[in-house]
């Protein structure tokens, strides 16, 4: 009762204004929810079916694409396995009951393949002529069962290199009909002798199919081109899914259609897996699709009713408070107000009163603005100090420039450059200044520098760091070139050095930072210039250090024993333990002799580790399988002493790699490659060819080329060329023979020798000899 009395009292006091505001608020606040509720009930129901069909259609497209992508990747992986050298032509003539090393290699490879894809059940190698099966679990076994042998033979005779086969290991349970992907070997051969058979685990494959269906109550069906059920999504529902699939076999509907089964209506969407021509079906109960919408509609209806009541109350409260801004303005301009006065007097003109007080406040604001402008340089300088120290790194570039503009420093789009000046040499002044006068000296230098940059037109601000260091910030217009910026800064720095030396009689070092487009980089530039001070010479009284030149030039020429690394990697590649250990010790000794900084030695070890990992990838091995999951870089960096790092390198890198190489490589191929290398070393001066070496070692040229490349990492011709060039370089350096004679001694004609030498070394033999004669040292 009291609420309504108060409401009508307010309406009477405000009269028409209040009633109109209340009606306006009721219209604005209540009408949209009412229209929304009606729209949901009228329009949403009509659109529901179309939206569900469209969503379901898009979902089946996405699921089909995902299945197609997964199976395409699966086929691509199997094709890559098929071209593996371990499944080459030689398997056709292998006695699988005698050559145990070959069988062990094949079984290891099959084991690695099985672990690479989650839904693989088993991988077998089928040798057609002998009816043999080779697997990681069972080894070598012959197919004695006549029906099974016929299934394998029929599957092998199918046309094409790779295809899907069903029921190779068929069981009595039709729901568990198996599927396998077959790829004939050797790959791309006109006369294949066998095949890789990758059998899919039906449980895991069905789990994968089920995971991509967001509707857990529905069915996900995958059928092959013969309308046989391959997967039913959730494997526990496979029997029900098989019944549903049998009911859908004769249905020719396209797109989305409704199918009644088992007392429920299902929305059926179908798609085709393009690569395999498999049919993909998604069956979802319609009540599961409409259930969220029905629930949401009911919730919205309830919320609308509650909201309607709340909005009525809010409209009344809002209209009551529409007058409150004027009341608050009056209370701001009249701070002292009697307790009994609850509202401004109605007979007074509040707007005129507010206008007069506003004019008074504007005058006071102008006075304060005047005072602020006099303090603006100090505020700007303080902001720049904070910027240099990195306290405003969280601000964006636009915010920084905006704040500087508020401090009357508009830098626009100019580039800025930070310069740091170090004053030193107090001890040379013979008592004129003491160590306690650092701030006095710095202040004097600050004033001198401020005066000098004031006349250049490029100065932004000068910084007094109180510790014999003074910095200043320069600006350059957008049109100025980098060379002009550098000349301007160098000229100004020279003038400052001359002035400071003349007036203070002290040493001066100037470090010029890099020009930057962003003010946010000033903190980093300040730190870099401070760090660059360590490059100054203590014997010079005046010097200028340009930060860009220091970064480009570095601290000296780098050394790395590339030849020793090459020999070490070759020894590791062929699994030679003794030679690898000896070459590693030579590598460390050479590095220690030419680089006397321990940090450089550590960096050399990390570089060698990267090269070894490159060889691992290059030879087709997995670093995770060779070295495990440990972080080799982190393991090496845990050791500060070089010897500890070397021991760790041998234990964690060299030994596992050599052991893996010895176990995985064919020893005969390695020995063959080594024998060919020995032949090259002894006959490089003759007309040496791949065919000749193949005849000498009683091997096919193609097999020799393949084995040589696999073991050495380089093909036969390139190895011969590199060895001849190496021998020619030794003769050019250590003998006075003519170039024509040297060409004949390494097996080349003169003109071809000059051309191939220049291609390999980027200089002619004569230029190489002149270079070596002028150099006092010869690295290795």
Image (cartoon, grey):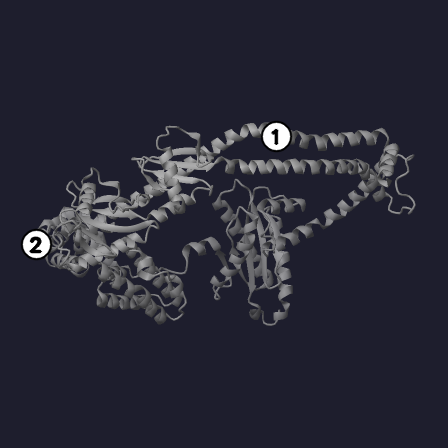
| Location of residue 771 by image quarter | bottom left
The answer to which of 618 and 142 lies nearer the viewer is 142
- The numbered dot on residue 333 is none
Percent x, y of residue 152: 20, 45
Does 671 appear above or below 28?
below
Find out whether the residues at labels 1 and 2 contact each other: C-beta distance under 8 Å: no
Is any part of residue 570 visible from this angle?
A: no
Q: Is residue 41 left or right of residue 116?
A: right
The C terminus is located in which quarter? bottom left
Question: Does dot 2 land on a helix, a strand or a loop?
Answer: loop
Question: Does dot 1 land on a helix, a strand or a loop?
Answer: helix
The N terminus is located in which quarter? top right
Percent x, y of residue 642: 36, 70
Is any part of residue 42 visible from this angle?
A: yes
Q: Residue at x 40, y 63 (%)?
A: 634
Percent x, y of residue 159: 20, 37
Percent x, y of residue 517: 53, 46
- The numbered dot on residue 41 is 1
Does 591 appear above or below 751?
below
Residue that badge 2 annotates: 698
Please identify, in this view, whether the residue under mark 1 or under mark 2 is nearer the observer: 1
């Amino acid at each position: 009762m009291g609420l309504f009395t108060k409401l009508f009292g307010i309406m009477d006091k405000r009269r028409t204004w209040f009633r109109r505001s209340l009606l306006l608020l009721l219209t604005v606040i209540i009408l949209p929810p009412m229209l929304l509720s009606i729209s949901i009930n009228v329009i949403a129901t009509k659109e529901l079916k179309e939206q569900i069909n469209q969503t379901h259609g898009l979902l089946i497209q996405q699921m089909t694409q995902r299945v197609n992508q997964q199976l395409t990747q699966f086929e691509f992986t199997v094709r890559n396995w098929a071209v593996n050298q371990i499944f080459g032509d030689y398997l056709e003539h292998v006695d699988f009951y005698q050559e145990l090393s070959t069988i062990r290699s094949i079984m290891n490879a099959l084991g690695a393949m099985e672990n690479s894809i989650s839904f693989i059940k088993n991988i077998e190698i089928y040798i057609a002529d002998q009816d043999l099966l080779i697997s990681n679990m069972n080894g070598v076994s012959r197919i004695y069962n006549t029906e099974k042998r016929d299934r394998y033979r029929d599957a092998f005779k199918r046309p094409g290199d790779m295809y899907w086969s069903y029921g190779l290991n068929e069981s009595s349970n039709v729901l568990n009909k198996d599927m396998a992907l077959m790829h004939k070997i050797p790959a791309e051969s006109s006369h294949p002798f066998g095949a890789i058979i990758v059998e899919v685990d039906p449980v895991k494959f069905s789990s994968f199919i089920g995971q991509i269906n967001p509707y857990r109550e529905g069915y996900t069906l995958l059928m092959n081109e013969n309308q046989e059920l391959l997967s039913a999504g959730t494997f526990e529902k496979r029997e029900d899914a098989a019944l549903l699939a049998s009911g859908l076999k004769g249905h020719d509907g396209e797109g989305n259609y409704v199918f009644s089964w088992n007392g429920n209506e299902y929305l059926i969407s179908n798609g085709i897996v393009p690569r395999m021509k498999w049919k993909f079906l998604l069956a979802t109960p319609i009540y599961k699709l409409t259930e969220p919408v029905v629930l949401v509609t009911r919730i919205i209806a309830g919320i609308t009713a509650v909201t309607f009541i709340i909005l009525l109350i809010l409209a009344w409260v809002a209209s009551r408070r529409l007058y409150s801004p004027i009341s608050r303005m009056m209370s701001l301009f009249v701070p002292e107000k009697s307790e009994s006065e609850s509202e401004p007097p109605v007979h007074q003109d509040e707007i005129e009163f507010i206008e007069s007080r506003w004019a008074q406040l504007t005058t006071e604001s102008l006075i304060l603005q005047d005072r602020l402008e006099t303090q603006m340089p100090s505020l700007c300088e303080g902001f720049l100090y904070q910027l240099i120290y990195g306290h405003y790194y969280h601000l964006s570039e636009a915010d920084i420039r905006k704040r500087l503009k508020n401090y009357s420093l508009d830098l626009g789009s100019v580039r800025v450059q930070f310069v740091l000046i170090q004053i030193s040499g107090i001890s040379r002044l013979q008592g004129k200044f003491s160590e306690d006068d650092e701030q006095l000296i710095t202040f004097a230098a600050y004033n001198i520098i401020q005066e000098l940059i004031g006349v250049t037109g490029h100065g932004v601000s000068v910084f007094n760091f109180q510790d014999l260091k003074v910095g200043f910030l320069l600006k350059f217009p957008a049109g100025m070139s980098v060379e002009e910026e550098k000349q301007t800064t160098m000229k100004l720095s020279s003038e400052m050095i001359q002035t400071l030396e003349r007036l203070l009689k002290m040493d001066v070092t100037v470090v010029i930072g890099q020009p930057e487009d962003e003010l946010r980089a000033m903190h980093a530039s300040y730190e870099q210039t401070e760090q660059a001070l360590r490059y100054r010479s203590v014997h010079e009284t005046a010097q200028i250090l340009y930060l860009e030149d220091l970064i480009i030039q570095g601290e000296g020429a780098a050394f790395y024993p590339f030849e020793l690394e090459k020999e070490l990697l070759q020894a590791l590649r062929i699994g030679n333990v003794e030679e690898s250990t000896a070459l590693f010790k030579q590598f460390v000794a050479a590095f220690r002799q030419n680089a006397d900084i321990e940090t450089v030695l550590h960096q050399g070890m990390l570089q060698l580790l990267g090269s070894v990992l490159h060889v691992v990838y290059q030879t087709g091995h997995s670093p995770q399988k060779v070295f495990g999951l440990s972080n080799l870089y982190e393991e090496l960096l845990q050791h500060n002493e070089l010897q500890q790092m070397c021991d760790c390198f041998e234990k964690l890198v060299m030994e596992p790699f050599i052991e893996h190489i010895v176990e995985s490589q064919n020893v005969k191929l390695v020995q063959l490659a080594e024998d060919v290398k020995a032949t090259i070393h002894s006959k490089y001066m003759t007309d040496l060819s791949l065919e000749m070496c193949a005849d000498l070692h009683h091997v096919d040229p193609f097999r020799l080329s393949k084995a040589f490349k696999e073991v050495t990492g380089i093909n036969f011709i390139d190895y011969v060329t590199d060895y001849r060039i190496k021998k020619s370089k030794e003769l050019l350096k250590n003998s006075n023979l003519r170039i024509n004679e040297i060409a004949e001694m390494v097996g080349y004609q003169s003109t071809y020798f000059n051309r191939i030498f220049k291609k390999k070394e980027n200089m002619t033999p004569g230029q190489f000899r002149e270079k070596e004669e002028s150099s006092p040292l010869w690295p290795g």
